[in-house]
Amino acid sequence: MTLENFYEKHYKKLMLFSYAILLISIIFLGYKLATTGDIIERDVSLKGGVSATVYNENLDLNEIENYLKENAKDFRVRALTDNIGKQTGIFIEVADVNENELRSLLENKLTNVNFDNEDEYAPGTTSTGFAASSYKGLLIALLFAFIFMSIVVFIAFKTFIPSIAVISAALTDILAALVVVNLLGIKLSAAGIIAFLLIIGYSIDTDILLTTRLLKRREEGPFYERLSHAMKTGLTMTFSAIAALGVSYFVAIPEELKQIFLIIIIALVFDIITTYAGNAGILIHYCKKKNIT
Amino acid sequence: MGLKKYLKFRVLFLLFWILASLIAINPKFSTEGVVIKAVEKNSSASSAGIIFDPSAPLTNREVIKRVNGQDVNNLEDYARILDKINDSGIVRILTDNQEYVMLKEGDLGITVEKASSSNIRRGLDLQGGTRVVLEPEEKLSNQEMSDLISTMENRLNIYGLSDLKIRQNNDLSGNTFVVIEIAGASQEEVRELIASQGKFEAKIGEEVVFIGGKKDVTFVCREDGTCSGIRQCNEFEEGYQCTFEFQIKLSQEAAKKHAEVTSKLDANLSAAGGYLSKPLDLYLDDILVDSLQISSSLKGQAATDIAISGPGIGANRDNAIEDATKNMNKLQTILITGSLPTKLNIVKIDPISPVLGEQFSKNAISIILFAVLAVAVVIFIRYRDLKISLPLLIISSSEILIILGIAALIKYNIDLAAIAGIIAAVGTGVDDQIVIADEILSGKKRKELINLKEQIKRAFFVIFVAYATGIASMIPLFWAGAGLFTGFALTTILGISIGVFITRPAFAAIVENLEEN
């Protein structure tokens, strides 16, 4: 089947599929908001709490996890590894005990660690108020970024439906990625929110390319040739980004960077659907009505 | 301008930036020796004339060649040689500039580090230290805020922490934060020094005689054994208690106040010479540090020389001496700098271990290397044409180089957030280069009458729209999360701007030329 046949036959279904993802995401996040008061699970950097890094090669992650389970509800433990994957210590984040409580809890368990030496035990804290204000600030930044992006798109295309198609594709990428983040049980850090800012940029690249080729380059060839050309270019872009971020995800050691890479990869996968099913579907429909061939 | 000339210009423009970046970064392939990283104010080192300019390029820092005639090749050498020198011994430091002679009185007041291999400044994440975010308890005016920052800087400096950065950040909701990054300090010291307002009051009864700060206290004796030090230690039930003592000089005004208040007191004459009826109480942040008996001979006198004392306790003698020394140092610091305009609350404190920082630095290089390589592989699979994938690889690498070059030039610290920004910018750059490559290739296939310039103009429409949205989405970050993401926003904006104005035009030129031949 040629690309033209495929799209002619299925473009409405494709369009509906893409917007169904948006709808399901909104319902999922709405339900989450109604039941938990927030659309994501936040880590200590956005919720407030204490953290501790213990540098010791002989710590058993599972044992410490089970031990903490008895004494705290909202916590997370992960291993720190060096460049070759050898464990160098552990990192603990807890939201529901204070700094001194965490220290005495760990002191009882980890008897071979010198808690007075900052090279062995390094505590950190983030106050609830500051975390909440950071979270709010980042959400406002995200909102502004989205609004600015929308304005730029409207200025660039000066037509309502194609602009809305681009903007809703970006919105779907963000919300769907949020749903997956929730389903994977990821606790979002401040760095994770930055990833959502980046999604805006990565998402609209391919959409702008597609819309420009279909609407503004009519002399370059028949409609579906232009579509196929835009797809080839756009998919190359998306796959290079996924390849680069995927490799980075496996190479990266800092947890913050790993989270950024993972979230963008998730969004890019959705972007393939929103761009070539959702946005392309709307544009085919729009061009038929406006007699753009 | 003819097309050929224009193409040549774009490539030359890129080469100019690459060269300029290399000069700014000044990479060194062999780094040996120890350099001066910071000098404390009023220390032996600064009295000996060692001046440290924090804004000097990292690779131009003063190199310590020899100490007391012995060669210094690494940090271990330096520590070993200094360790052997007795207290009050003479230290001769020969640097690549000149020789400095000083007395060793405790600490010399120099922080040293391994010579840097380039001018790229690493942020706290990549070198280790403590980052603290503070929130003033009361709303401060701009003037008060700048006073607060300079007092704090001064206080940390006098205490001996010189490798630090303090900045103010206002968020969108109107909150003001002070962010301090200190390399190589223990968290406990940092907490004590900056979270305490440092309000020092010397009272007789309810009347304040003098307070900390230059107005009342004109001189504080420090690091001079004749007028400052640990005076006595006593054993008691649970351990040891030591007493520190140091001299200060009061201003005429404060001395007059002293005369006025003491004249009202009764003299308690006894065999030992006698004291006045009320002592001089020293309060730090409203907590009584010590009460000093006032000799009855000082009644009504405008005394300018006063000895300040206080305790230190510990399980054994050494601990007690250490504690007393710490308390003395803190009190001296506060008497010199005065109090902060308001109390500050620590809202976030993060320790970053130097080991982890070192590891992250190496990791960052691997991430960028592997990411660029992965892109090159995808591009090669798609085009099967080295004439496209090779320039893309070169252009992306030069983009990273220019970002780092500009960061080195404007002395911007590269931290984890900045690395994420670099990766984001390079990712966008690759996307744009693919658009350009495809435009050029498809233009050739169609062999239409659209000229090359028009073709590139079209590619750049997409690029400019993407660029505008990229910039727009980064700007709000400057006001979020106490500015902890500024590095990310700045490198991303820098990266995509370099891409749009420098590297991408050159990429288009290179691919066109290669494809034409």
Image (spheres, coloured by chain):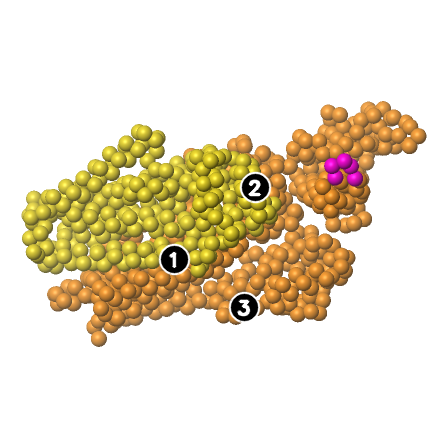
Chain colours: A yellow, B orange
Nearest to viewer (mark 1 / mark 2): 2
User: Disc number at residue B31?
Assistant: 3
Q: Which residues are magenta?
A: B235-239
Residue located beneath label 1 in the image: A251
* Location of residue A202 in the rendering, given as x and y in whole percent from the top left corner: 28, 51
Residues at discs 1 and 2 both on one chain: yes
Q: Alpha-carbon distance for marks 1 and 2? A: 33 Å
Q: Residue at x 39, y 46 (%)?
A: A191
Q: Which quadrant is home to the C terminus of chain B? A: bottom left
Q: Alpha-carbon distance for marks 3 and 2? A: 41 Å
* Location of residue B216 in the rendering, given as x and y in whole percent from the top left corner: 72, 37
> Which chain is disc 2 placed on?
A
Element at label 2: helix
- Was residue B444 drawn as part of the magenta stretch in this picture? no
Residue located beneath label 2 in the image: A107
Residue type beneath disc 3: Thr
* Residue A54 visible in the snapshot: yes
Residue type beneath disc 2: Glu
> Which chain is disc 3 placed on?
B
